[in-house]
Amino acid sequence: MERLKLVISQEEIAKRIKELARDISKDYQGRRVVFIGILKGAFIFLADLVRAVHLEQLEIDFVRLASYGYADATSGEVKITKDVEISLKDKDVLIVEDIIDTGITLDYYLKVLPRYEPRSVKVCCLIDKPERREVEISIDYRGFYVPKGFLVGYGLDFAEKYRHLPAIYEIERVS
Ligand code: IMP
Ligand code: MG
């Protein structure tokens, strides 16, 4: 059995996304930007973020990086199971990630990206959760800092459950 404890409310998420969007819009004004959402977790965050930014030449694509198994433990191995489909050449890339935990997934992808010859690459994550960080990641836009815990909702899942919840909760296991 699991119990959910509210960590970040819908209102707090909405407010923070507006702030992030303001910064991103300012920094990328006049640029050709590709927002790359990391599936599946970032789909809701990306959807809200792109609707809050004001950028004329904005493109959206997705990658699916498989690093987690069915449960909540990382294997340390990363595979691209769905790659980007639009050209990144000479464009500014903003990686949109739900949560950075060990950092292994993003570290891997950041090393692969130069092969597509983007003009620049930055990272935007909704949640920075440093407790289990193994690889240092430079985060350019950070939504929230949550020191620890396993979070669900707003795209984040536990064994595919809870992604649809509009707020973010910590899972507490009760037996
Ligand atoms: P990392 O490679 O350890 O940084 O993990 C990255 C991925 O693991 C994230 O994009 C999430 O999909 C998943 N993940 C890490 N922590 C959590 C969590 O607390 N809840 C749900 N998914 C998580
Ligand atoms: Mg993810």
Image (tube, helix red, strand yellow):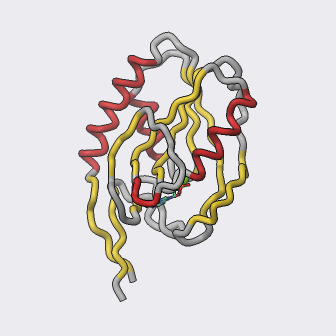
> In which quadrant of the rendered image does the C terminus lie?
bottom left
57 or 24, which is in the foreground?
A: 24
Give the image location of residue 18, x and y in percent: 31, 32
**Which residue lies at the image location 71% right of the left edge and 47% below the top edge?**
82
Q: Relative to 119, is 151 on the left or the right? A: left
Residue that protrudes farthest toward the bottom in the picture: 175
**Which residue lies at the image location 55% right of the left edge and 69% below the top edge?**
73
Give the image location of residue 165, x and y in percent: 38, 59
Residue that protrudes farthest toward the top in the picture: 30
Residue that protrudes farthest toward the right in the picture: 115
The count of marks equals 0
In the image, residue 38 sits, relative to residue 75, either above or below, namely above
**Which residue lies at the image location 44% right of the left edge and 42% below the top edge?**
125
In the image, residue 23 sits, relative to residue 47, either above or below, namely above
> In which quadrant of the rendered image does the N terminus lie?
bottom left
Q: Relative to 16, is 91 on the left or the right? A: right
**Which residue lies at the image location 40% right of the left edge and 54% below the top edge?**
129
Q: Relative to 149, is 64 on the left or the right? A: right
Give the image location of residue 5, x and y in percent: 27, 67
Q: Quadrant of residue 131?
A: bottom left
143 or 131, which is in the foreground?
A: 131
In the image, residue 171 sits, relative to residue 131, either above or below, namely below
